[in-house]
Structure formats: C-alpha cells, structure tokens
Amino acid sequence: MMTSNGSPRHRSRTLATARRLLPAAGAIALALWLLLTLAPPKQPDSSEAAPSGTTAALPADSPAAPASRAPSRPPAEPLREPSAPESHDDEPDQTTQALQVVLRASWGSGPGSLGTNEPPEGAQTGPMSFAQAPCGALVVLDQANNRLKLFPPGRSPHSLSLPPGWFEDVALTNEGAIMLLDRLGEGRIVHLTPDGALSAETPLEGPLIATAGGVTGLVTRPDGAWVEVERRRMVHVAKPDGTPVENRTMLPGRPTHDGLNLLSAAIEPPGVVALFSKSAGPHNGAGRVLARPAFELPPLGIVLLEPDSTGRIFLVVHTALFESEAPFAVVREMLELVLLAADGRELARTSLRPGESGLEQFRKARLGADGTLYVLLCDEHGATMMGWQP
C-alpha cells in the first residue's frame, strides 16, 4: 500500500478538507492550493549531495564506493623497491638504477646450459662461481658439467674443459689467464692459460694458512693470486705466473684500489652492518667506522665487500626474517645491494630476492672489470645473471 504524499488516500483527504474550508468563489485559490499541496517533493540536485571530490556516507573500504573516488589511504609500498639516497643541492642526483638481466641459462649440458649436481645425499650444487674476463665475457664455473662456460657479449657461448679436481671459485687476470680454487680436494690453486691449458699449480696450506678448507675466496691482483681466509684476512700465495711467493704476506682486510686503505665489515644488531677502514701501512691501528647502513630485515651474512677503481665501495648483504617458532621457516628473504662513496656516504641501493632452488653456491656476487656488480641467482628453471651499474 502506497503511503507517500502522492497516494490516492492522501489525495481524497486533501480534496475533502478543501471543500469544507473554501467557498465556491475561492475556486481559483483552491486550484492554486491544490497545485502546491499535491506537487511531488523536490529531489536535491546531484551536485548538491556532497562537496566535489568526496563521497558521502560511504566507509573508506566500502565495496559500494565508486571506482573513481580518491583512495582514503596510500597503497601499500612494494617490497623493498630501490630507493634514492638523500639528495644535496651541491651534488648530482644519485638515483638508483634498475637491475638488468644480462644472462639466462637453463639447466642441462647443452651449449648454452649450465649443470646441477643433485645427489640423493649430500649438498646439491649448481654453478659454483663466476668472473668477468678482460674481453667482457662472463665466465661461469660449471662444475657439474666439468667445464668453464664462457658467455661473450653478442656471441655464442663456448666451453673450456676443467682439469681433474673439485673447483669452487674462479678468477681471471688482466691478461686473461684463469685461476681455479680447489680447497677441498687437492688444496691448491690451478693456473690455466687463456685457452684452458694447464700452466701451474700453487699449494694453499703453508704459512698463514693452516688448512685449505679455511680459504673462503680467490682474488687476482697485479702481483698475483691472493686468497681470502675465514672471511677476515687476505694472504698473497702466488705470483702472476703461478709460482709460489717466497714470503707470504697478510692483509687484515680488503685493500682499496690504490692500496692505501683496508676495508672490513661486521654485522651489528639490530639490522646494521658496520664498515671499517684503516690504513694499509705497518701502523694501521684499529681503524675507524666508515658507515653503518641499516636494513629492514636482519642481516644473515655479508656476501660481498669490494671497492672499485674509482674508490666507491660495493656491499651485498643477505637478509632474512624467520618465524619465531619451529621449524623457523623463512618469512622474507632479500639480497641488499648498496653503493657507498669512499667517505662512507650512501650513493645508491637496490634489492632483489635470492634464488629459491636450494642449490649451494660458493660465490653469488662479484664486481666486474666494467664496474658492473653481477649477481648469480638459481631457481628450478635455470640460472639468471643480474647486473647493477648505478
């Protein structure tokens, strides 16, 4: 039953009242009164319902809200998007450059593939390490296929066979000679010519290196081969031609390109990595704190700390957040890439998710001769090399 002002019941009631109150001579007045009384109520204009740019009587997250309305709160920030460092009026704008894919390789033994070793028991391994040749080629240590895989820019990949041994790291000299680290097999460095021929071998154990298993990296410098020991010190073990040095020397840190200072790093809770610098001279002292970059997730380990030829410092930190109860599953995991000036100022930063294959890698990141920071990631589909050149 209708009960609004325009209903039949309301209309008859109004006419009866008008006949009792008005004489016949007031017909004109009656008509005017009826017109005003029976007219439908005026609807408000849509432009008057609410001020422009707002939505009336709708909660911020209501599904009935029109799609064109302004959001009531900013959208959630994406996970660790690259952020630009603080800018200064007297400095150029140092914006973070995007990571780029420079190499993709599927799993297998084909010409453009890389291998994996997945035994029923024991560690599952993929490409153990990589380096960049002076010609720009990326050289991947494809241990599972017993070869070095060379990916020259703009050309088809090719391979060099590995000599017998269990190699975990590779490094190249400025002349293109190849050095291979065999720390768990024969405890040595194997030296190859640029075309892969065996030229020399250098034993690892000796003065300043108690066990070959304590070696954690291989580095080439103009004066020959150096190894990192327990991620704390550098030891000079071989001359450029592979001949063992007569008197080994040790540096308590990673030397800068000019050789004047030594760099080291340590994790400091909560979520901070401290970078230290001290003189490379005989009286280097305790050093000083160069920078303390902070991270959103707790740091697990320092993947890379390496200066370039201009004095800038590249830092790669593995960060992760775990559940507080067993089995302590990973909640979030990132690789943080940071570039700092020689004086410790942060210049650029970016991040990426590490591979999810579970394959063991000896080296995940390396600074190339072209100034690009390369990161090797592995997943179930294959290997991907990322390049960052801020």
Image (cartoon, rainbow, N blue to C red):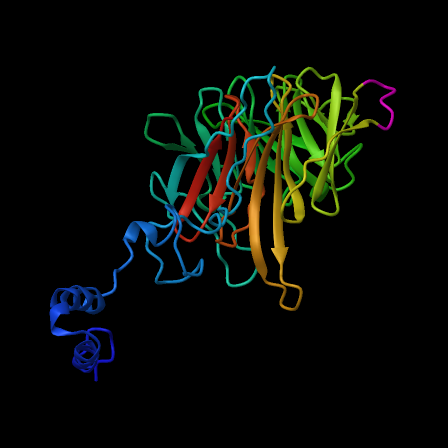
What's the magenta region?
Answer: 281-286
Residue 284 is covered by the magenta coloring = yes
Between 73 and 126, the one lying in front of the other is: 73
Task: Give the answer, above or below, for where 11 lies relative to 48.
Answer: below
Asked if residue 275 shows in the view, the reply is yes
Between 344 and 236, the one lying in front of the other is: 344
Main secondary-structure element of the magenta-colored stretch = loop
Task: Give the answer, above or below, for where 36 lies relative to 127.
Answer: below
Number of callouts: 0
Residue 37 is covered by the magenta coloring = no
Horizontal placement of 18 versus 295: left or right? left
Q: Residue at x 51, y 30 (%)?
A: 96
Task: Give the answer, above or below, for where 61 lies relative to 142.
Answer: below
Q: Residue at x 77, y 34 (%)?
A: 206
Asked if residue 168 shows in the view, the reply is no
The residue furthest bottom is 1
Residue 145 image-quadrant placement: top left
Q: Position of residue 260 (x, y in %)?
A: 75, 16
Q: Residue at x 36, y 50 (%)?
A: 69
Q: Quadrant of the N terminus?
A: bottom left
Between 107 and 76, the one lying in front of the other is: 76
Q: Position of residue 106 (x, y in %)?
A: 37, 45
Q: Position of residue 305 (x, y in %)?
A: 65, 32
Between 64 and 136, the one lying in front of the other is: 64
Task: Give the answer, above or below, for where 200 lies relative to 330.
Answer: above
Q: Position of residue 143 (x, y in %)?
A: 49, 43
